[in-house]
Image (cartoon, rainbow, N blue to C red):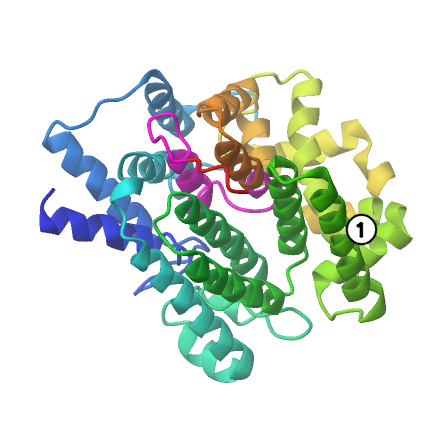
Amino acid sequence: MTIKKSFLINITAFFSTIPFAAPIPISSDVQYPVFLLAGLIFIWDAVTKKINLNLFEIFFIFFAFLSFFYISPFAEFEYSLFKRVGILFGFFIFYFFSRYWKDINPNYILFGIFLNLTAALIHFMLPEFWISYGQSFVRSIVLSEIMGSRGISGLSAEPSFLGGICIYLIIITYVLLQEKRISLNVFYLSSISNLVMLYLSKSGLSVFMFLFMITVLFFLSNISLLRKVIVVSSGFSLLYLFTFVIELNSRGFTLLRILFQNPEYFFFVDESVGMRIISLLVGFQSIAQGEIFGHGAGSLPFVAPDIIEKAGLGDTFGEFVISVSGGIWSSLGQYTTEFGLIFLFFILYAFLHTNGSKLNYFVRSNIFLFMLGTFSILFPPLWACLGITDKRNRIIDQNNY
C-alpha cells in the first residue's frame, strides 16, 4: 500500500468521527468530506482493478441506483437529487470500512474523539464564542438554535447528533480494544470523554441508546450469574439515584422519570417520543394499507398525512404530536414508506450479512437504533459499523466482555 493511500485511509476514518463538520459547510446536517474521501478510495480501487464485489454488495449498488429512479406515477412527489444520494453514499462508507478497517491507525480515531471533546467543552464554557466561530465549519442554521434548555452540540449539527456520535465512538473503540489495537487505559479515557460529551448534549435519545448498549453488552458477557446479579443491582441503584434522587438536569433522565411515573404520557403525549414512534408507524402502516412496494422516491411528505389519517394515529397520539411530527422522520420510516418491502429486504440483508460472533451482535444491535431514531440515512456511523462487522471483514472477537 502506498503512503498516499495509507494517509487517505486514515484521514477518511478521522472524518467519520466528525461527519457534521466541513471546511466550507453546505446546507445539510451531514457534511461531505467523509463521503468524498470514501468515494475517492472506491474509485481508486476501481481504476486499479482491486474491486471484488460479493452478492450483497452488488444488490447494495443496485438498490442505490434504484433509489434515484424509483418514482411512482400514482403518488405526488418532490424530486431532489441531493436527497437521493443517501444509499449510494452509504455504500461508499460501507465499502471503505469493510475493506480498510484493519489498515486504520487508531490514533486518527482517538484524535477525532479529542477534537469532539475540545469543541464540546468550548461550546459549553463559551457558547457565544462557539456560535460565532463554529458556524465556519458546522451548519449555522442549526447551531444558532441550540441555546436555552437544550444541551451543547459541539462539532455536530444538534445535541442528539453529538450523542449519536458518542455512541458510535464508544462502539468502535470497544472493537479496537477487543482487537488489542488500543490499551484498556486508552479505552477508559476515550469512554470517559464520550460520556462527558453525551451528558453535556442532554440528549434524551442518546441516554436510552447508552442504556441499551450497556444492557446488550451485559447479556452477551461471559461473567458469572452472581456477578451479573451484583452488576444489575448496582446499575439500578445508580440509575435510581441519578433519576429520582439527584434528578440530573438532562432530557434523558427527565424522560426516564416520565417513563416510570407516567408511561402513557411517555409514549402517547410527549411530542419527542411520539414523533419518533409515528415516524416508524407511517412506514409499516403504508405497507399494511396495500403499498407493499412503496409510494416512490420523494413521496413521503405528500402521502404521510393520508397514511396517518387512515391509520387513526391522530386519535392515538393527539393532533399536537401529529403536527410536530411533520417533516421529521426516521430513515427506517421514510424509506419503508417510499420503497416498501424492497427497502425492508435490503436492510434485513445488510444486518444479517455478518459472522455469528457476540461482538458483531453487540455492534449491530446498537447501530440499528440509529435507524429507529431521527438520524438521516446518510449518517456515516450506521454504514461504518455495518462495514466493520461485515462478513468480509472478520473482526477479532476475544470474548472479553
How many numbered dots are placed on residues in this image?
A: 1
For badge 1, the amino acid type reads: Phe
* Residue 154 is at least partly visible in this image: yes
Q: Above or below — where is 285 with respect to 272?
A: above
**Dot 1: what SS?**
helix
Q: Percent position (x, y) of residue 396?
A: 39, 36
Residue drawn at (31%, 64%), measured in percent from left and top?
24
- Image-based side of 158 in relation to 272, left or right: left
Residue 80 visible from this viewpoint: no
The magenta stretch is 369-396
Is the residue 276 above or below the residue 99 in the image?
below
Quadrant holding the N terminus: top left
Question: Does 395 lie within the magenta span?
Answer: yes
For the C terminus, give its image quadrant: top right
303 part of magenta stretch:
no
Between residue 178 and residue 210, name the one nearer to us.
178
Q: Which residue is more in the foreground, 129 or 54?
A: 54
Q: Is residue 50 above or below residue 245?
A: above
Between 50 and 363, the one lying in front of the other is 363
Q: Is the residue marked by circle 1 packed among few (<14), some (14-19), or many (20+) residues within 10 Å?
A: few
Name the quadrant containing residue 43: top left
Does residue 329 appear left or right of residue 262 in this picture?
Answer: left
Q: Name the residue tied to disc 1.
A: 320
Which residue shows up at 34% across the image and 31% down it?
393
Give the percent coordinates (x, y) of residue 321: 78, 48
Give the image location of residue 308, x and y in percent: 74, 33
Seen in the picture, residue 388 relative to 26 is either above or below; the reply is above
The residue lying at 25 percent from left, 52 percent from top is 10
On screen, residue 375 versus residue 259, left or right, reads left
